[in-house]
Amino acid sequence: MHRFSKKVSMTVVKRLPKYYQYLSDLQLNDIEKISSRELASLMGLTASQIRQDLNSFGGYGQQGYGYNVGELKEAIKEILGLDSEYNCIIIGGGNMGHAIANYERFKREGVILKGVFDVDPLTVGTVIGSVVVKHMDELDEFIKANEIDIAILCVPREVGQKVATQVTELGVKGILNFSPLDLDVPSDVVVENVNITDSLFTLTYLLGE
Amino acid sequence: MHRFSKKVSMTVVKRLPKYYQYLSDLQLNDIEKISSRELASLMGLTASQIRQDLNSFGGYGQQGYGYNVGELKEAIKEILGLDSEYNCIIIGGGNMGHAIANYERFKREGVILKGVFDVDPLTVGTVIGSVVVKHMDELDEFIKANEIDIAILCVPREVGQKVATQVTELGVKGILNFSPLDLDVPSDVVVENVNITDSLFTLTYLLGE
C-alpha cells in the first residue's frame, strides 16, 4: 500500500493508468529512456503536464537525461497499487460478467478472480473464467472466508444498491461498478463506475456538435 | 442534430447522461416538478452547479417553480442527440461484443445494431444480439450500403488502430472504443473510450490511498 502526504487530483490519478500503459509499451519495444517531451508527444499531453504529474509523486526525471522507462514504469505500478495482489469476485454472470471474467489483463496485474455469483439457476454451476459460478446465497460465507478486496458488479440496475450494501457490510472496500446507477456506500469504500450507456450518450452528443 | 453557439465544457457534457438518467427515473416515479436544490441533492451536486450546467444550454427552470421533469428530460434527450436514430455496428464478436450487442438500452435510445463483424470462423455465422455475424471481409461493402454512424470497437489492442482507420476511411464519424489503446483518427471523427483496465487501476490506486 502506498501513502502520500499530499492529495493528488483525480485528473492526475486518471492519467496514471495511461502512463503505465505507454511505459509498458515502450519497455516492450526495448526503449530504455525517454524525455518528457517525447513522452508528452506520444500521449497527447504537454511536457510541462508530464513533469507536473510526476512531481505530484516525488518526481522521477533527471535534468538533461529524461526518464528511465523501466524505473518509471515500476514506480507507477507501485503508485497504482499494482505491486499488491487483490482478491476479487464478480457478481452477475451475464454477458458483461463473462467479458470481465475473461479479461486476462486483470490476472496479469494481480487481480485474482476468486468467485462469480449469480441467482439464475441456468448460470449457477457453469464455469466462467475458470471458476464455477455459485449462488448468491453463498456470497456472505464466501466473502468472509476469502478476504475479498474488490467486488465487480455486473447486475441489473434494480438490484445494484442492494448488492453493494451487502458486500460493503461484509468488508469489501472496492467496487468496480458496471451497473448503471450511482451507488451509496460508506465513506471508506471506493467505487469506480464504468457506465457504458453514459459513454454512448457522450458520443451521440459529440456527433451532433 | 443540435447546435449551440458556445462551446460547452466536457465536464458539463459528461454530466448530461446523468441528468437524463435521474430525470427518467423521476418521471417513472410520476414526479412532475423538481427544484434545483432537490435535483442537486439526488445527484450529489450543488444547486448552483445544476443551474449553471443547464444555463449552458439556454436554461430551463422557472424562478420559484423549479424544473418541469418531463420537459427537462426531453430537452436533455435532444441535447444528447437522442431524438435521432443511429446505425451502429460492433466489430469483434467476443465476450465484450456479445455484452454490448445485448444491451437493450442502446436500441431503446435509437442506437440500432445493424451488424457484427469478426474474423474468427467459429464466430462468423453465429447470431449475436439478433444479427448474424459477418466476416471482416464484408465490412467495407456493408458500411457503404448501410450508412453506419457508429462503430463499436471490441477488438484486441493489436488491431484496434487498423480497424479504426478502416471504418473512418469509409465515413464512420463516431467510435465507441473498448479496445485498450488511444486511437488516432481524423479531426471530424469523435471517439469515446471505455477503458476497463484503466478503471480497475484507478480503483486499485484509490484502495491504497
Image (tube, coloured by chain):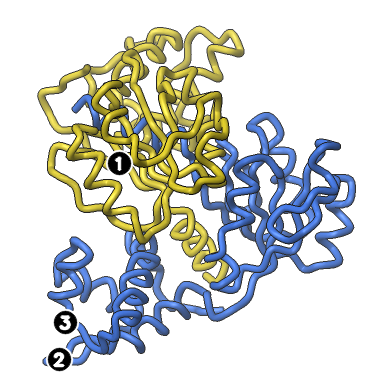
Chain colours: A blue, B yellow
Q: Position of residue A1 (x, y in %)?
A: 56, 79
Mark 3 and mark 2 in contact (Cβ < 8 Å)? no
> Residue B16 placed where, x, y %?
36, 29
Comparing labels 1 and 3, the label whose residue is closer to the camera: 3
Q: Which residue was labeled with disc 3? A: A35
Can you tell which mark lies on residue A63? 2
**Above or below, A15 relative to A162:** below
Chain of the residue under the numbered disc 1 shown in the image:
B
Q: Residues within 10 Å of mark 2 (few under 14, many from 20)?
A: few
Residue at mark 2: chain: A
The x and y percentages for residue A119 are 82, 38
**Does A10 sit left or right of A148 as displayed?**
left
SS label for mark 1: helix
Q: Which mark is residue B35?
A: none
Above or below B176: residue A189: below
Subunit of label 3? A
Q: Residue at x 46, y 33 (%)?
A: A197
What amino acid type should be assigned to the residue bearing mark 3?
Answer: Ser
- Residue at the spot 86% in from the left edge and 66% down from the top edge: A145
**Residue B38 is at least partly visible in this image:** no
Residue at 40% across / 68% down in the picture? A7
Distance in Å between CA atoms under marks 1 and 2? 35 Å
Amino acid under disc 2: Gln
Pointers 1 and 2 within a single chain:
no
Residue A69 position (above or below residue B156): below
